[in-house]
Amino acid sequence: MERVTISGLSVAYQRVGRGPALVLLHGFSLDSRSCRPQLEALSDQFTVITWDAPGAGQSDDPPDSFTLTDWANALAGVLDAAGVQHANIIGLSWGGLLAQAFYRAHPWRVLSLVLADTYAGWSGSLPPPMPEQRLAAALDDSTLPADEFVRRYLPGMFSDAVANDVRRELADIMAEMHPAGFRTMATVLARADTRAWLPAIRVPTLLIWGSADARSPLTVAQAMRDAIPAARLAVIRGAGHLSNLERSTEFNALVREFCLTRPVR
């Protein structure tokens, strides 16, 4: 992976392939490795960029005061370093919240949005008191030993039918979660409510959801689809929260078909 320093933070990213740019944004407690199937499959027709968001993977932890806009500006710095002006932005779970913030801060750079198994923030998508309950649990769980953390969070990421090798791959990634980064991301996610942003989205938007997503149920997807002008919802039957890993073939086909029809600038 390459590195760039942004606002004093060392941020790791990877760029592979040629063609229209795709930017893959991972979820919290994860890093760019959770986008491996997309990096491998889509780099034949796209320039695929993945990053370890500040607070994850090989990147530095941000301060506790880091905001969604700070993450969006850090992503803009990574795209500058990678020589990419315009891109299709694919956000997975927490990364989908970041994708919304990136569009709000840098709309001219976004060709399209793919929002997968995500939220309009926990406060914007989940009924009270669930956002604060989830946040309190996340803050407590950030101090758990790695194996216990994985046992607690891994089951909610997939359906019961997920392949064992996929489950093991994610377990290895989650075991290297950054406690400080996880706390900061969870806090931002819990407090965010982006519902007022959604009607202002003016780029083609595809929502991809697993029908068996227990963390962000299909009703969240339907509400976001209805709020975003001309958005389309594609449901992967039987997939859980990380549909990009559990059912990567279907996920990749949806992304490929959608993004190849976007104009290149």
Image: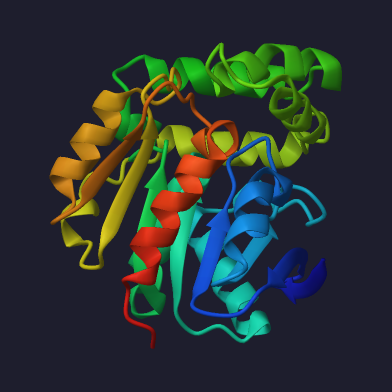
Observer-nearest of 102 and 231: 231
Q: In screen coordinates, is 182 left or right of 20?
A: right
Q: Report which quarter residue 192 is drawn in.
A: top left
- When the figure is inspected, residue 73 is found, relative to residue 129, above or below; the finding is below
- When the figure is inspected, residue 99 is found, relative to residue 49, above or below; the finding is above
Observer-nearest of 180 and 253: 253
Q: In screen coordinates, is 252 left or right of 62?
A: left
Residue 139 is situated, as x and y percent measured from the top left of the image, at 64, 23
Residue 159 is situated, as x and y percent measured from the top left of the image, at 52, 17
- When the figure is inspected, residue 30 is found, relative to residue 139, above or below; the finding is below
Identify the residue shown where x is 45% and y is 20%: 132
Q: Quadrant of the N terminus?
A: bottom right
Residue 228 is situated, as x and y percent measured from the top left of the image, at 18, 51
Q: Report which quarter residue 27 is drawn in.
A: top right
Identify the residue shown where x is 75% and y is 31%: 174
Colouring convention used in this rendered image of the protein? rainbow
Q: Is residue 101 visible?
A: no
Observer-nearest of 87 and 74: 87
Q: Report which quarter residue 48 is drawn in.
A: bottom right
Identify the residue shown where x is 57% and y is 61%: 42
Observer-nearest of 13 and 34: 34
Q: Quadrant of the C terminus?
A: bottom left
